[in-house]
Image (tube, helix red, strand yellow):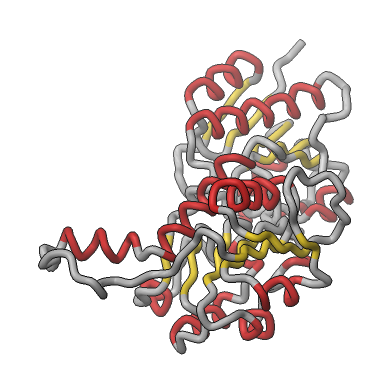
């Protein structure tokens, strides 16, 4: 049987690449930037399957072609798939899969890192020492915000949201409130469900956004919800950048309407607004949520499992 022709849009960990190369007629792009819409259109006509990565331009227009599309599956490397027009893929008979579960623990860890770094001004302190400007301990130097015993508000209580809440509850004795679409009855810790994201954000000292990326969550966290936060509160985003209205967040931070923010994702990443980078009350990470070798390997193997099942005539285990 002729091997299926598969494209991996950006190089993955070596162990994943070796397994993919042993199974498929494999091609890998020699680039670290996402596929453009024009590139996406081309590869849809040339490959049987594509293992796609964050930001690849699989827009509705990319699926439009004067010739039949060869591609039958887009195996996404990651949980979020807002870079793929799902409706267009379905219209053209192309399966789309993702990698849920593999990213939970590492993403939750980054959320806690952002809470601590923002509240305790860790990055500012590091810069002070490196610049040679630290003159020694002082009673009122770089006073931050306490984390232990405070209230965390989780917006989106899925796998990642629950993992963040668990760390906050058991690790820092925090009270947990949350807003989510589906009722939850099996939590292993005490948490209070709120009627809406706004209600959760009004009472939280730390707000952590962990919703999935889809049209319904675009700008879910808007100016009205940010305005509802307490003045000492801190906003953390480890979901997708466009779940927050970035311009409204920047304005709130500039006015010191809220105490700060910790961001691992951005609305137009990798572009980060200069107004945001100029602020000292925000910690900015380069989308490190899943940047752990074991996590990235697990994501890659799950994506390959989806490809393997599909080409074997079976239902992919993680079809979206």
One can see residue 59 in this view: no
* Position of residue 189 measured from the top left corner of the image (x, y, whole percent): 73, 47
Q: Where is residue 29 in the image (x, y as percent from the top left)?
A: 51, 37
Residue 74 vs residue 181, the one in the foreground: 181
Count of number-bearing discs: 0
Asked if residue 137 shows in the view, the reply is yes
Farthest bottom residue in view: 255
Q: In this view, does 184 lie above or below 121?
A: above
Residue 106 lies in what quarter of the image? Answer: top right
Residue shown at 57% from the left, 18% from the top? 21
Q: Position of residue 319 (x, y in %)?
A: 82, 38
**148 lies above or below 1:** below
Between 298 and 47, the residue placed more toward the observer is: 298
Q: In this view, does 302 lie above or below 71?
A: above
Report the residue at 51% width, 52% height from top: 112
Left or right: 153, with 317 as reference point: left
Q: Nearer the viewer, residue 43 or 309?
A: 309
- On-image quarter of the C terminus: top right
Q: In this view, does 61 lie to the left or right of 316?
A: left
The picture places residue 14, in percent across and down from the top left corner, at 48, 23
Q: Quadrant of the N terminus?
A: top right
Residue depicted at x 52% and y 20%: 15
Q: In this view, does 138 lie to the left or right of 132?
A: right
Q: Which residue is drawn at 55% across and 80% down?
A: 247
The correct choice, above or below, for 222 with respect to 114 in the image is below
């Amino acid at each position: 049987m002729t091997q299926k022709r598969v494209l991996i849009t950006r190089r993955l960990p070596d162990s994943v690449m070796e397994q993919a190369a042993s199974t498929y007629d494999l091609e890998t792009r020699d680039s670290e930037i996402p596929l453009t819409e024009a590139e996406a259109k081309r590869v849809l006509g040339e490959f049987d399957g594509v293992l796609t990565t964050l930001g690849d331009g699989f827009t509705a227009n990319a699926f439009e072609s004067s010739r039949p599309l060869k591609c039958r599956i887009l195996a996404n490397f990651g949980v979020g798939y807002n870079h793929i027009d799902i409706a267009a893929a379905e219209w053209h008979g192309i399966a789309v899969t993702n990698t849920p579960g593999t990213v939970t623990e590492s993403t939750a860890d980054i959320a806690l890192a952002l809470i601590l770094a923002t509240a305790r001004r860790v990055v500012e302190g590091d810069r002070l020492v490196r610049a040679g400007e630290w003159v020694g301990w002082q009673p009122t130097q770089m006073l931050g915000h306490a984390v232990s015993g405070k209230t965390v508000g989780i917006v989106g209580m899925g796998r990642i949201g629950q993992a963040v809440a668990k760390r906050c509850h058991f690790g820092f004795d925090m009270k947990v409130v949350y807003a989510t679409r589906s009722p939850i009855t099996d939590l292993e810790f005490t948490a209070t469900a709120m009627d809406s994201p706004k209600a959760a954000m009004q009472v939280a000292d730390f707000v952590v956004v962990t919703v999935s990326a889809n049209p319904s969550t675009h700008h879910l966290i808007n100016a009205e919800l940010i305005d509802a936060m307490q003045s000492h509160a801190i906003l953390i985003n480890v979901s997708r950048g466009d779940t927050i209205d970035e311009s409204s967040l920047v304005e709130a931070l500039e006015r010191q309407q809220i105490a700060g923010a910790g961001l691992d994702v951005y609305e137009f990443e990798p572009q980060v607004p200069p107004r945001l980078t100029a602020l000292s009350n925000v910690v900015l990470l380069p989308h490190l949520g899943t940047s752990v070798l074991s996590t990235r390997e697990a994501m890659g193997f799950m994506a390959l499992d989806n490809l393997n099942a599909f080409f074997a005539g079976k239902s992919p285990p993680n079809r979206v």
